[in-house]
Amino acid sequence: MSTDEMHDQPASGPTEPTPGLAPEDQAAIDELIAARSDDGTHGALSERGERLERLLGVLDAGPASRDQTLVDLTLLRVLRAGEPHEAQLDSPSADALDAWVHSGFDAGATPVAFRDQASQHERLAALCTAPMAGERDGREQRIDRVLGGIQAQIDSQDERFQIERRRTGLSSLRFADIVSIAAMLLLATAVVLPVLNSVRQEQRVALCRSNFNDVGSAFGMYANSHASMLPMASAGLGGTWLDVGTTPERSNSANLYLLVRTNHVKLDRLACPGNPEAPTARLASDQTDWRRLEEVSYSYQVTPRGKRPSLKASEPRIILADRSPVILRLVRGDSVNPEANSTNHNGEGQHALMSDGSTQWLDAPVVEGDNIWLPRVAEDKIWDQRTKQGLLGDERPVSDRDVFLAP
Amino acid sequence: MPPISDEHIFEQYRKGDAEALRTLIERHHDDLLRFLTRLLGDRVAAEDVFQDAFLQVHISQDTFDTSRRFRPWLFTIAANKGRDYLRKKGRRRTVDLSAPVGGSGGGREASFIDLMEIDVPAPGAAMDDAEREEEVQRALDGLSPPLREILLLAYFQRLSYAQIAEDLGIPLGTVKSRLHSAVASFARQWNLRTRARGES
């Protein structure tokens, strides 16, 4: 096909015009093709023809140098293509190998039929396992290097371990650090514990007040069904208000316990949270009183002789309060402080249930000059002792050992 | 009095006797270094892997079951390290263009090797040691890495098929067929070399 014929071919691209050769160049190509002979030589060319030949010569440029390795590898692949794909032992040799392995790699221990082949296997193996020249050279140094490497590994592990421990901060604490931490803990304890105690105390006070509300309701119900009378287990004390449990029919606490016996209130409502010894579960069914003074949480009013406690009163009065500290100390034989608050709430005060059903918090046991822990007669005696009238000014020490100082 | 077992010595090492490990290294130095040299075909690399193998023994000491044998465990670790080395290095085995090329039949069927037709020198036979070592290594280099590994493990560890299978974690049948193939390939490579040497 001549270049003219090539130009006559329709353009394949619909839009891009095909760049064309100048007629002189087309003639030069035809000249070059016509001038080339089969052996690659050609006759004389015009100047344009020679330029065209140089241009086309660029396309013939090959690699700068020949890669001998590539040639060798290619040849090797061609040669090995003719190799058998995989070598296999023939049957006697394979059986001998199995026998040799089963005999613990001892040809002498194989059956006689396999012994020759097994010995051959042994010799083949010996080729690989035979000592090599110079393998013991530098043996000691090599072993030392191995051990040194292992020691370095151990040291590295130790170092990492120490770093980890430092990160966790457990081992690197100095004594001063420990002291500082201990001081901080103590400080925190000193701050937090009172707060916690205060919270607990407040909770106890709140629960106790709730008890008083319930007991007040119980008193009201009891009074409604007993002609406004409050509980009274016996016609009169007969004994002393110091008694609890031992002579229930004559104790004042037995009067209060009557609320439980008549199911107007549960025993746990008469148990102050501030009294750890107060029973909360109902005692025996025939129980008529608490078993001992420590179990009693609340002190109940003592009525004048010949009178029964009732709600018939013109003015509200206190009928129940947190347990009296006076009687507890009297029973124990301890000195008495009549102005002390109940021990139910750390001596900070006490609840008082009024006859009108209300509950008050008293910061002191004295209400309008009346000490709720003592009868008037006892209060008067103490007052007399404390007033000037109790001391006339002419009293003298009984001996030199009776120290008494005066203005 | 029988020598103290490897397993007992290793147990002493695990209990803190540092010198016990030196005893074990000394015991297995020659065989292990030879095994690695044959496996890797490179003495320097073998020395590096030798050190790595014992370091791994130290690191993995808690995993060793003393009811089993120490030597196969050591060689398996060394083989693993050798495999890692070859993989990391991305090693292309040197093409030995002078290697004799067999295949007189010219086909692609498996060639069956009759071991009795192979010229294998008896131990101590007259042959230049250096030359023989070189020829052995060239013959081994002609094997694929998996075949070379199983051949050397079998020759150096001297374990039963079942034990090799357990150590390598491959089926027993595979161990057997692979070892057969490895021995046949090595025998053929060796035979080709000795024939070529005889012709030259």
Image: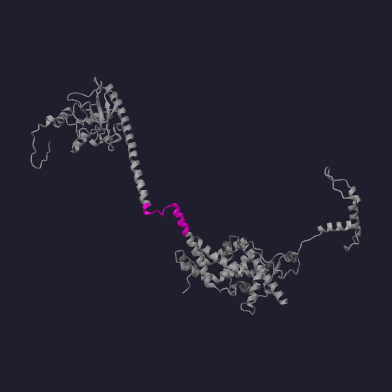
Question: At which x and y percent is residue A394?
Answer: 8, 33
Figure coloring? one colour
Quarter residue A78 falls in: bottom right
Q: Is residue A169 magenta?
A: yes
Q: Report the number of discs.
A: 0
Quarter residue A38 falls in: bottom right
Q: Is residue A201 left or right of residue B5?
A: left
Question: At which x and y percent is residue B176?
Answer: 62, 64
Residue A245 visible (yes or no): no
Q: Is residue A143 left or right of residue A54?
A: left
Task: Write the residue at 46% across / 64% down.
Answer: B14
Q: Is residue A378 left or right of residue B87?
A: left
Magenta span main SS: helix
Task: Write the residue at 65% across / 72% down.
Answer: B136
Magenta range: A158-176
Task: Give the answer, above or below, for where B54 lies relative to A390.
Answer: below
Task: Write the residue at 61% across / 79% down.
Answer: B124
Question: At which x and y percent is residue A232?
Answer: 23, 26
Question: At which x and y percent is residue A251?
Answer: 20, 31
Q: Is residue B75 magenta?
A: no
Residue A123 visible (yes or no): yes
Task: Give the answer, above or below, for where A190 lies relative to A62.
Answer: above
